[in-house]
Each structure stands twice: as C-alpha cells, then as structure tokens.
Image: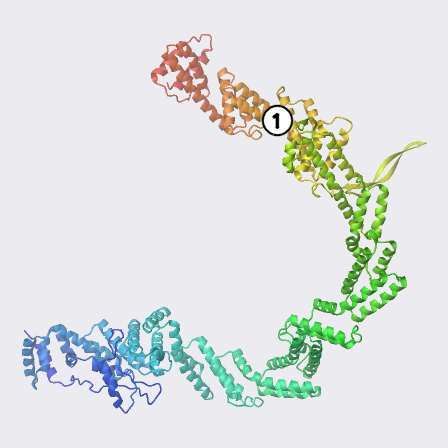
Amino acid sequence: MKVSSEALILFCSLAQTNSFSFVPHNSKKTVQWNRALSSNTRTFVTANTSPTFGASAPSTTDRKTKKNSDKFHMLVFPSGKDAFTNILENESDKLASTVRRVPGPVRKAISVGAIPAAAVGGFLLTPSRRAIAGVVGGAVSGIIGGIGKDRLDSATATAAKPALAQLFLDIGIDGAGIAEAVQDVKKQFNVGEEEFEVICADVYKQYLVCMCNDPNTKMSDISELAKLRSALGLGNLALGQAHAEGAMDIYRIKATWTPTEELADPEHPDRMSMDKFLFLTERSLRAVGETDEALTFEMSRVSKSFGLSMKVIEARIKAIAEPFYQRALTSTRTKLESGAVSAEMLKKARNQLGINEWSTRDMHISCFSDEVRSLLGVDKAEYDSSKCAFPEGALDRLNSLKDVLELSDDDAKYEIEHEVTPLFQTTATAAFEEAMADASKAEAVWDQISARQAELGLSDETSASMIGSAAVQAVGGILEEAVQFAKVNNGAKTLEFVNKALDTKESVVTMLSASEKNDEASIEKFFDSDSENSATGFIPYTDRSKIYAVYFNQSLKTSKGGKTLTEEQEGKLAELRALLGIDDEIAFTTIKNTCGPIVKETLIEASKDVLGPEYDSDLVVSLKKENQKLIDNLKLPAEIVEEYSHACYVDGLKLVQQNTPGGIPSKDYVDKLAALRDLLDIDMENVRSDHLDTFGPSYKKSVIEAMGVTGVIRPEFRAALEKLRNGLGVSEDDAEGLFLEAVAEKMKPMVKALVNEMERTLLTTEQLSQKRGIDMGEDVFKGGKGAQGKLGIGAAGNLIGDCMNLVDFYTENDIGKKQTGTKTVEKKISSEDGETTEEVEEPMFEQSYPVTALEIGGCDEESAEALYRQFLVTIFTEQGPNVARYEAAAPTFGYILGFDEEKQEEVGGNIGSMIYENYVNNVMRTKPSLDQQDMMFLANIQTKLNLSSEKSEELLVAAQKKNLQEEATRVFANLSSSSGALIKSFRERCNSMGIDLKEDLEMTSERLKGMFTVEILEGIENGSISPESGDLLSEIQESLCLTAEECESALEVLVTKCAEGTLSAIGTEFRRGRDERAAEEIKKLIRYATFVDGELELDVSEEMAQRICGVFDAVDTSEEDPEKVQQERETLRTALGI
C-alpha cells in the first residue's frame, strides 16, 4: 500500500503529542434514595438508555448496584448530569475510545482513504517511544492486521456521543462557547448533520430521564433543559422525539415494576418522577413556541406511552405547577412593602410554569383572601370576633396587593366584605336586640354600629345592606315561626306570633329612623312584600295567605260577641295585609270564609221570618236595619253580601214552590217575595233567571193546556197567560222561550203523523216494511193496488189537508211573529157623507221560524224533502178553489219544515226539472224551438212550483241541453258521409237556441272536427261549397266553436284523403276500360284539388298522369267556358305533378 507524505507527517505529529490522551471515568455514580431519611425516598438505578421501548427486568448490573448501594453512607441526589457519566461508562467500547484519541485531521484522512485504517490501529497499538518506529510498526501491523475502514468510521461516529458527554462534564451545559464546542465535536468526528442530531437528541433524552430520577421538581429544572437544548442546537422535531422516547424509558423504569396502588399515590417517588417528566415535557415544548396542534400531538405521544388521558395529564401538570406559583404568591405577600415584587414578575412566573388564566384568578383571589384574614386576625385558631379589626394602613396594603395581583375592584371588595360581614353582622345583631329591648337606646346603638363599620372598612352601601338583612331577619324569623302554627290552624299561637312580628317591625322602624342615613323609602324596602330580600319575601305566597286567614279568623273569635272587630284589630289586620302583600282576591276570600257564614246565617233566618205566617211590613224594616248593622260592623264587601242575599232568595223561591199547589204561587206569596227582595236589596231583573228555573215548568204546562186539542191558543187565553207570567216573575223573553218549547212539544207529533201518512200513501206494503223495519201486514189500499199518482210521484188529498193544518197551527199562534215598528198607510173610510181617506198607523211585523220540524226531530231531512215535494206536486196537479191557498202557503210550509229559500228552490227545481224536460222533449219533436205559448205555459209551472225566474230559466236551458245531447247522440250513432244535411240542421238548431256545442253540450274538439268534415264533404260533392264559399265556411267554423287553424287542417286532410280515393277509383276504371266513368272521377279530383291550388302531393306515375290528362282533354267541353276549362286543366296537371 502506498502512503502519502502528508499522511506520514500527520502520524509523526500525532506520535509526539499527549494532548489527545483520554482517561475515562472509573468511578460509577450510583444513587440511592435512603428510605430511612424520608418516607418518600427510594434507591434509584441509572436508566438504561437503550432506545428500544419495552418492559424488562432490571439488569444484573442494576441489581448489583442496588445491592451494593447499602454500603454508601453519604446520600447522593440524582441529577441530569448523571447522564453524561452513564454515557461515558456504558457507550464507550475499546475501539471507540481509541478513535476518540485520534486527532481530528487523522480521522478525516482515514475517512477519505488517505491512510489505511489498520495503519492507525497499528500506530496506536504498537508500544514504542519513537514515532517513526511506531509508524513503521503500525504500517506493518496494518498490512498484517487488515482493520476495515467502515468499522473505523462507525467507531468514529459512536465516539462522538461520549465526546459530547465529556465536553459537558468539562465545560458545563451553560459554559462559555458550549454551543460552538458541540459543533466542533461534530466536525472532529466527521458526523453527518442528521446523525449528529440523533446523537444530540439521545444525549438530551438521557439527561431528561436522569433528571427525573429525582422526584422533587425544581424551578431550575426547566432552565437546565432549556440550556441543554440550546447547547445541543435541537430543533422542535428532534426535541419532541427526545421527549417521546424519554417517556417510554421513564415509564419502563418507574412504572413497570411498581405496583398500581403505589403509582396511584401522588406522593410516591415513582409517581412523582413520572409527574415531573410530564411537567418538564409540557414546559419544554411550550418554551420552543410549539403551536397548539403540534403540542397536542407531542403530548399525545407521551400520553400513549404513559397510558393516561390528556385530561389526567393536564391535572398532574397543574398539580406540580401551582405549588410553585403558590410559593411565589406567598413570597409576594411577605415582600409587598419592600417593592421587590410586581405584577410583571408574577406574569413571568406564570408563563414559565404554564398557569392558565382561570387558575391564576382563583389563586390570586385566594392569596388576597388569606391576606385579608391575616390582617383581621381571623386566621388564628381562636379569636374574639368582636375585637377583630383592620390595623392602621391595612386597607392601603390590600389595595397595593390588589394591584400586584391584578384583581378588579369588585373582586377585592367582595373578598373583604366576605370576611368582615360576619364580624359586622355579630355587632349589628346584638345592637338590634338591645334597641328592640329598649327603644330609647336607638341613637346609642347607631353610634356603636357606625364605629364598628369604620373599624372594618365597610362602605355605607354594604353596611346598610347588612343592617337591612338584620332587620329582615328580626321580623322574618318570627313570621317563619308563625307559618308553622298557621299550617296546623293553631289560631292562638298564630295570633301571638303575628302580633309579636308586628311589634318587632315597629321597633325596627323606630330604630332605623334614628339614623340620618335612613329615609322612609329605604326603611320600607325591607318590608316590601314584592321583594325576595324583604322580611316576607322568602315565605311562599300560599303560606302568607294561610297566616292572614288564620289570624283574621282568630281575631274575629276573640272580638266582642265574635261578630265585631275592634279598631285595633282592624288596624293590625290592615298592617299585616300590607306586610304579607295579600292581594284583593285573597282578602276577599278570607273575609268571605270568615265573616260570610255569620252574615249568611242571619240572612237565612230573616228570610224565613218574611215568608212565614207572621209577616208584616214593619218586620221587614226591623230585620233590614239589623242586617245592615251586622254587615257594617264586619265591613263585609258588597259582592259577598249580594252573593249571600241571592242564595237566600233562591232558597225562598224553592220554599214558595213547595208550599203552593201546581207550583203556581198565590197572591200572598207573590207579595211576600216582593218584600223579601226589598229586605235583601235585590232587583227583580237580577233574579229573572231564578224565577224561570223555579216557575218556568208551571208556565210551560199552562201554555200547553191553553193550546187544547187544536193546538191554537184562543185570544181570551192569551191575556190569562200574560197575567200568569207577571205573577210568576218570568220575563217576556223567557216566557217566549217557554212558549216555543211548548210549541215544539205540540208540533212534533203533528210532523210525525204527516210523515207516517205520506209513507202510507206513497209506499207499498213491502217498501213500508223495509223502511220501518217491521211487518206492516196486508196492503192498506183497497183492492190491493200499489201507490198511484201523477207525474210518477203520487198525491193524496188527506196529506195536503194535514200539511195545511200544520201551517195554520204555526200562523194562528203567531209563532215567530214579532212587531218591529209601525208604518203610516192611507185607509179609505166609508160614512154617510161618502168615502174619505185617512192616514193611520199600522204595525209592522217580522216573521221568523224559531221552531222547525228538522230542529225538534219530528223528521229527518229525507222525509222533510219528500213532504215538501209532495206538497208542491199537489199544488201542480190540484184543480179547484184551494189551489191559490196552497200556493200561498208553500213557502211557509217549507220554512216550517226547516228549509231556507235556497233549499226550497232546490226541491222545486228537482220537480220542475222533470216537468220541464218532459215538456221540452214533447215540443221539440214537432217544433225546432219553443214559441210564446210554450213560454207562457212554463211561466205558469214556475208560479205553481214557487220557482224564481233565474231558476226557471236554468231549468229550461238544462232541459234544452239534455234534449239536444240526446239528439246529438242519435245523430252520431248513424253518422255517414251522407249525414251532412242532418248535421247542418242540428247545428243551426243549436245556434237558434243559443246553445254552445262545446261548452253547453260538452262536445270534444275531435267530434266537432268530425261534424265539420262531414258537412263540408257533402257540400263539396254537391257543389254547394267551393273555394269561393268563404263566408259559409266561416259560419260553419264559428257555429262549431273551432279555430281557423283547426278548420284549415281538417279541410286539408279531407281533401287529400278524398283525392287519394278518387285517384284510386280512376285507376280502377282505367283497368276496366271505362274511360267515360273515369272522366267523372277526374272532375271530382279537380274539385278537390281546387281547394289547395292543386298542391295534393299525389303518388302517381307519369304514364298514369298523362293518361288522365288525355282523358280530360278528350272530353267535350265546347259548351263550357274555355277560360274555366283551361284553369281546371292547369289545376289537374299541378295535382298530377306534370
């Protein structure tokens, strides 16, 4: 192997220097946590720095170290520097240590192959004092030994880590130029950038793990790690990886062989080490400015290694950070007056420890509260609350502390008041008790309270609030006891405690009024029932109502005679009502329940005396005075008096009804009832309904009796009924209602009889049995024939008579007839002097139908409709003098049944529809339309059926439509090409009657087009329609309700189809040799082609076209117009495509 001269020079210089000799550490630093010295101490073993994560038993070396550690007599605490010693001891093999002593230039030369690696090995291993001999010996050894270059490169990289450890032991992690020295190691050992970052991260990780062997966390730990990270030049990714791998190592060391219950103990050393690791990790990652997302990711890796949730990790970190900050706050209180602390310093501490805003606020408030308690002296185990007070300058000190802690004025005020309130409350309560015991001491009490307020530094507002609270408690406490007695209706105790509460309130008001700070409004707010903070605000309203009711009742019981309240009692009740906030409704109910029974009993007895046999006018006057005196004494509201008076009067009415035959009172009882109303101050109009309930049935019974068999009340009975109504005290409206009820009872069987008669007359035995659901026996008609009638409906003389009886019953009893006013009319009067005209006033009446057959259930709607229909049919078919009477009664009968005008017209229309249809069909068979005589006949039918003009016209149009629809059906059933005249006649008939084919007869567009085609086809064939017949075509189009486009399209299709058919016929005639007949068809073809100017687009051969033209030319046209013949020839040629 050839060796360069530069390499030889390098070897010589290496042989002559001793500066690269390396002496490794021989002393092993083993740490023991002496259990005898502390309950939380334990023996620590150095961490296995293998990057492989997993649970494994302690190594033999660890166990020996632990066993021998008992021999140590001095306790050595672990630290991060132990990592450097571990690296030197555990990661330096012989070759790496040898390479580490080789100068950097030599290692670089070896790396690039300038010197054989074995030569260097020989140089180092050959014992000689002479450099040249060493070189030669090394060269020989290199040639013989064959040390590989790759192995030497690996050893060089491995040696970099121990070199770093040695460097940190020599200079320190914060020594001068440490960062540059670290980079020099990288250069000297020729380590790549990425590989060197991995080495530095591993050094950092081992330092972190060794640091956590000490379970006690120190503030300097954070700065140590920051300095080491800065010296190693670790980036964020490398730092995160180091902490993630450290988490696996620390978990393996501390958790794998530690019982779960010990790890659950926050004070166990292993648990403390793990929590310390979590704290240092979070702080280190925060310090390098990691984003929230990146921090979450890195902490999740640690969370996974520890098997803990992020929430638990955050709690453990907080448990370490907050004690440090708590010590800072304690120090702040100690050094407050020195000015050595400030808000900015606390902020820096918080940032370093990671204390969030919420925790900061809680800790600051707690610190401030501790200072307040300390200044007051209430933080001692025993203290006299009456003597606790702020020393001079205490409030200024608290203000300074507030500024340092950055607390708001409200927070500071709250904490101060929270501590001094109980102290002030004690003084205020004692002062209140003294003032209430002796009202003359009110001013002295206020001086005592004011002095205590100054000692405790309370504001006037807070002091007033607490004094008010004491006042509220003084009165409210007594009322609270009163509630318990009221709930069990203990009237005596309730009265006692309520009176005590009212007296206490008066004393409190007197005491509060002694201060100039309290005006009337400020005092009254403590007893405002609407306020939740008042003396009664905490008592539920139901309980307050109960107190008031029991107190009222007990006060009345203890009054004179139990029926009269004294002025003092009334005053206390008024005061209690205001204090409890009792509304009018509860007060009213209380008075009613308490005083009402007394008044009611008195009124009942008085009513019995008036209705009794010893009644006279003087008795009424005497009783009325006594009743009024009692009411005035009890101050009973008028509403309650009216209620009880009314109840007594109703009882009196019932008593009178029971003591009179038939329920109709005698004149004596009528007078007594009037006297009773006078006694009770009752107006007759206010008890009309009660008279109706009591005597109404008797009045109704009298009305029914007055109707008799005929159902009509005679005039002489009407006056008697009016007199009876007045005696019974029934109002006119109520009497009218009773009269209508009697009418309904009388009318219902009449209607049912009508329905039965109608069914018997019109239905067969089988139909009647089926309708009624019972066997009707033999046919009721003589001879066994079925029902017969006119117009297919049937009629009977007896039925119309019964219907008229119902109408007479309704009209002669003036049912629903009311006078609405009067009108002036001229009336002719005959006398001996002749006939004169005078103006007289006549009453005006309005007719209604309050009782109908349908409403009273006399029949169903179907039966009512059948009755009305039968009535109308009878009018139409009847002949004789009664027809006019029947016609006039028809609307009245309809209303009595329960039909309005619209329904009556509908029923009449149904009959009229059938009659109109039959009549129109008969007439239209012989006439194209109805004449004047026919219209007069229909007008007569309209009158008989009680139809309006509009309804009559509607029926006529409907009949005509139906007739024409039937005719259209017949026409289209036999439609052919020869039906043109028939269609024309039908169309013109519809036009003359004003019938729209499309709208009225509901013909489709396709059917109308068909009618157009048939009529046009016949016209074309007979020559009545030609291209010049534009007016006729327009008339047909409008009559058939078709558009011009629809007609043009239909005509074009018609002409094309006819032309094609004609062309086919021409071919047939040619094949049979009948040119003469073919000529006739050619004429037809020309007529069709004329409508489209020859544009038929026929499919015809040239030979056929020429033959057709030849036949046309051969026909004799000498007698025809030459110009017309020439025009036809051109049209034919165009049609044939020539």
Q: Residue 626: which quarter of the image?
A: bottom right
For residue 379, side relative to residue 589 (left or right) = left
Q: Can residue 111 be seen in this view?
A: no
For the C terminus, the quadrant is top left
Q: Can residue 593 be seen in this view?
A: yes
* Element carrying mark 1: helix
Is 1075 or 780 nearer to us in this picture? 780
Is 640 or 668 nearer to us in this picture? 668
Image coordinates of residue 228 in percent, x first then y, are: 29, 79
For residue 399, side relative to residue 202 (left or right) = right
Q: Residue 350: which quarter of the image?
A: bottom left
Disc 1: CA contacts within 10 A as few (<14), some (14-19) or many (>=20): many
Image coordinates of residue 212 in percent, x first then y, are: 31, 81
For the N terminus, the quadrant is bottom left
What residue lies at 16% left-to-right and 74% top-to-bottom? 154
For residue 826, side relative to residue 485 (left or right) = right
> Number of labelled discs?
1
What residue lies at 58% left-to-right and 89% top-to-bottom? 386
Image coordinates of residue 644 in percent, x first then y, are: 77, 63
Residue farthest to the front? 777
Residue under pointer 1: 960
Q: Residue 507: which quarter of the image?
A: bottom right
Is 787 or 412 nearer to us in this picture? 787
What residue lies at 31% left-to-right and 88% top-to-bottom? 34
Residue farthest to the right? 832
For residue 222, side relative to residue 581 (left or right) = left
Q: How is the image coloured?
A: rainbow
At label 1, which amino acid type do we have?
Answer: Gln
Image coordinates of residue 1049 in percent, x first then y, are: 47, 26
What residue lies at 65% left-to-right and 23% top-to-bottom? 930
